[in-house]
Amino acid sequence: MLIYGKEIRESVKEEVKRAAQEHQMKMTIIQVGEEGPSAAYINGIRNFARDVGIDVTVLNFASEISEAELLAKIDDLNRDPGLTGIMLQKPLPVHINADLVVNAIDYHKDVEGIHPFNLGRLLTKEHGVKPTTPKAVIRMLKAHDIDIEGQKVTIVGRSTILGGPLAVMMIAENGTVTVCHTRTRDLIQEIRNADIVVAAMGKMNFITADMVKENSVIIDAGINFDENGKMMGDVHPEARAKARVASAVPGGVGVITVAELFDNLRILAERNQGR
Ligand code: NAP
């Protein structure tokens, strides 16, 4: 069975819309250089913002902006009392240290949930903002009544925005978690062992039918584009067909991710009220 994210996104949208009537919310997106492949993501954010009545501004800086200038801009945004959330569109040009810039964002305005303070809160299981794509993966499983507790979960990918925090969140949901990466010795066996596989690697059609067991659940967070510009996941369509449940690409995790950004904005607005 193929599962999709649209209905889930719409239900989060309703929740955010209600919250926006109670709390003033405003988000700024920092973009450095050309829009490139991020244009579709930013458009998705703009459309969602329009639907829920939230003010989103995109600040576009030339790719030559210095690290110091960007840090100064973030400092200004941190001090703006009317601003709820700051999002940093990545990648940044190579002369800018992206970690330094993320660390400079006030964690109270970290709408992506990627500031080290907020990532630390994940480990201590405190309520707060969380990285958006891992949130989307967990929400998708829960929305389809797929148990995580006690299940063997294999995550392929360990990035700071996706595979890494997802592993922590899956442990918090009482899954038994294996995290795979390019140094994993027997990746196929680790995938075959799993009740739930999450593909988060960025390798088109990498996970093939022979790698997955029949009763498994596969969530595909990968976004790749083939030579015709068609969006493809990390999981081959035949592997999807073999699984008990598999998420669609496009139309799966990706469409929920934007909603999770606004869910984080809602959490920041509610937490920061009266701060
Ligand atoms: P990333 O930073 O490049 O990380 C990729 C991870 O996959 C790394 O941990 C890497 O291992 C692992 N990996 C790559 N090739 C592998 C292989 N052959 N065998 C085993 N592990 C392998 O990418 P990311 O930012 O996490 O994104 C991953 C994918 O998710 C991309 O397709 C991206 O577009 C997509 N994504 C989707 C959304 C969404 O909204 N759905 C949001 C963000 C990202 P090492 O650590 O050893 O290098």
Image (spheres, rainbow, N blue to C red):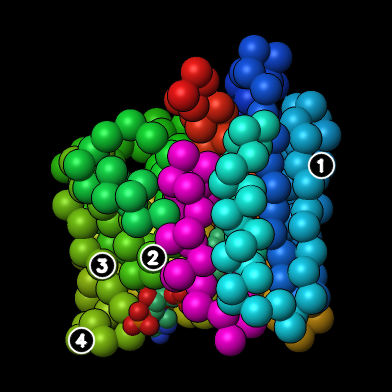
SS for dot 1: helix
Vertical arrangement, residue 224 with respect to residue 182, above or below: above
Q: Nearer the viewer, mark 2 or mark 3?
A: 2
Front position in the image: 183 or 211: 183
Q: Give the residue type at disc 2.
A: Thr
Q: Nearer the viewer, mark 3 or mark 4?
A: 3
Locate residue 171, reporting x and y percent.
21, 47
Q: Say which label, 1 or 4, has the lower sequence index.
A: 1
SS for dot 2: loop
The answer for how far apart the CA atoms under marks 3 and 4 are is 12 Å
Is residue 157 highlighted in magenta?
no
Q: Say which label, 1 or 3, has the lower sequence index.
A: 1
Which residue position is annotated with label 1?
A: 47
Q: Which residues are magenta?
A: 90-114
SS for dot 3: strand
Q: Are marks 1 and 4 in contact (CB under 8 Å)?
A: no
Q: Is residue 77 left or right of residue 119?
A: right
Residue 208's image quarter? bottom left
Indicate yes or no: mark 2 CB to ligand 1 under 8 Å. Answer: yes
Locate residue 35, reporting x and y percent.
79, 70
